[in-house]
Image: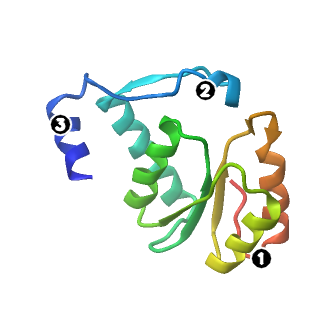
Amino acid sequence: MDFFKVHLQNTPDTVCIVDPPNKSDLTGSAPERLTYGEFGRAVDAVASALVRMGVQKDDVIMVQMPNCWELAMLYLAISKAGAIISPAPVLWREAELGHIAELTRARLFITVEMFNKFNHREMGDRLRAKSSFMTRC
């Protein structure tokens, strides 16, 4: 995080992160290029939102995202909020994710709406409905 902070402070207008060119084929969202300043503001905004939602120190947050700027941002934002990220491969489905959610007592599950024509949001909704400790966000 210190390396990121140095660049954020010294070169906020320099490109920090670039999405894969096929992001729109996989998620329906256009690929983006963010500067350190833009990326830093996203990290701060998401970390603040997590804290407002009640995320506390050492809460586990499961994340299932493709390799895009949002995934990198979540690593930093979750850490900044004091929580622990539990990343999951995008190919995992409800059975695997449910097992990990119960094992880690994950408080939240963050994913994309769709990835490679599979509805991850619906799967996430089913996971939350089965969990006694996962919060809807």
What secondary structure is found at the residue carrying circle 1?
Answer: loop
Dot 3: few (<14), some (14–19), or many (≥20) neighbours within 10 Å? few
Say the numbered circle drawn on residue 104: none
> Residue 94 vs residue 4: left or right?
right
Upstream in the sequence, badge 2 or badge 3? 3
Residue 83 in the image, given as x and y percentages of width and height: 47, 66
Residue 66 in the image, given as x and y percentages of width and height: 60, 41
- Residue 123 lies, with reference to residue 69, above or below; the image says below
Tell me whether circle 2 and circle 1 mark residues in contact (CB < 8 Å): no
Mark 2–mark 1 distance (CA, rounded to whole Å) = 34 Å
The amino acid type of the residue labelled 1 equals Ser
Tag 3 residue: 9
In this rendering, the label closer to the viewer, 2 or 1: 2
In this rendering, the label closer to the viewer, 2 or 3: 2
What secondary structure is found at the residue carrying circle 3?
Answer: helix
Tag 1 residue: 132
**Front residue of this view, candidates 52 and 84:** 84
Corner quadrant of residue 100: bottom right
Q: Residue at x 82, y 41 (%)?
A: 119
Say the numbered circle drawn on residue 23: 2
